[in-house]
Amino acid sequence: MPTPHYGQPRYRVIADELRERIESGIIPPGALLPTESALSAEFRASRGTIRQAIAALREDGLATTEHGRGTYVSAYPYDQAWHRDDAGETRQREIAADAELAALFNVQVGTPLIERERVGRNGKKVEKVVRAYRLSRADP
Amino acid sequence: MPTPHYGQPRYRVIADELRERIESGIIPPGALLPTESALSAEFRASRGTIRQAIAALREDGLATTEHGRGTYVSAYPYDQAWHRDDAGETRQREIAADAELAALFNVQVGTPLIERERVGRNGKKVEKVVRAYRLSRADP
DNA sequence: AGAAATTTGTCCGTATGTATC
DNA sequence: AGATACATACGGACAAATTTC
């Protein structure tokens, strides 16, 4: 199989399709996405590519994944619940830009931002907290 | 080769090692990381695993990657002053822990923390702001 | 200007580990 | 305990952007 990602890469196309289903209500909030294997079969893509697509949804706060269970569609756009991630515990929420963040992003105060917070532990001790802020919808 | 990710997965161990080199100055700010192939050879890990490790660094705002070029180490944390760099801008300051951070670190409110802020741009537009918090110095 | 080499990006298939049901 | 589902890791192949010659 060649790898002709003309225009958009495959995982992007799949992510957009899934986003479409979520935002149109075909897959309701709180529901589980089909399993990675099922999506792999449906889109005729490898599981790795499906995982890349789902990772993109997570980045946008549309879904959260739990080991051994599945990927849930976020209840509201953004889920405040902690969930396991690559690197420890992560949660996402939507916040309003304060004066400082608004200035950095060059937007109005109060503009909604996505805050992704990751807690890095060493054993039981919290070593660092990383918060990443981004505007709600980033495309090409 | 088996895949025994006892305790920590391999990509995380590699990411931690690279972070160590960055923060200790072995790989100076603004410099290019070794290529993925080189790291793959050094750590005797597949390229995919190396890419996962680098992705972890990107999440923390420690590095930025450019297609066809390589991965740059983000600017060094300068006190208060902003520093412009191809890989972004960074500043560092000391803050007092608010209630939320204090709870996460399990310390008293007001405990001094180091906040490191990086601004990721795409061209002129700010795409991402990453803030990393650490305890000042004391090692519990 | 053009071709080749370098380097990151995408995708596949497979195997095995780990958490949950 | 067994089945299901996500996580990690390997190796190979080709695409696309950049640099070098």
Image: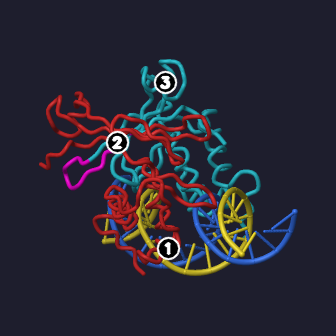
Chain colours: A cyan, B red, C blue, D yellow
Gap in angstroms between the C-alphas marked 2 and 1 = 28 Å
Q: Considering the image in quadrants, where does the N terminus of chain A appear?
A: bottom right
Q: What amino acid type is highlighted by mark number 3?
A: Ala
Mark 2 and mark 3 on one chain: no
Disc 1, SS: helix
Residue B93's quadrant in the figure? top left
Which residue is the site of mark 2? B132
Gap in angstroms between the C-alphas marked 3 and 1 = 40 Å
Q: What amino acid type is highlighted by mark number 1?
A: Ala
Residue A103 numbered tag: 3
Q: Residue at x 52, y 68 (%)?
A: B36
**Segment colored magenta:** A117-127
Mark 2 and mark 1 on one chain: yes
Disc 3, SS: helix
Chain of residue at mark 1: B
Which residue is the site of mark 1? B38
Q: Tag 2: Cα neighbours inside 10 Å, few (<14), some, or many (≥20)?
A: many
* B38 inside magenta stretch: no
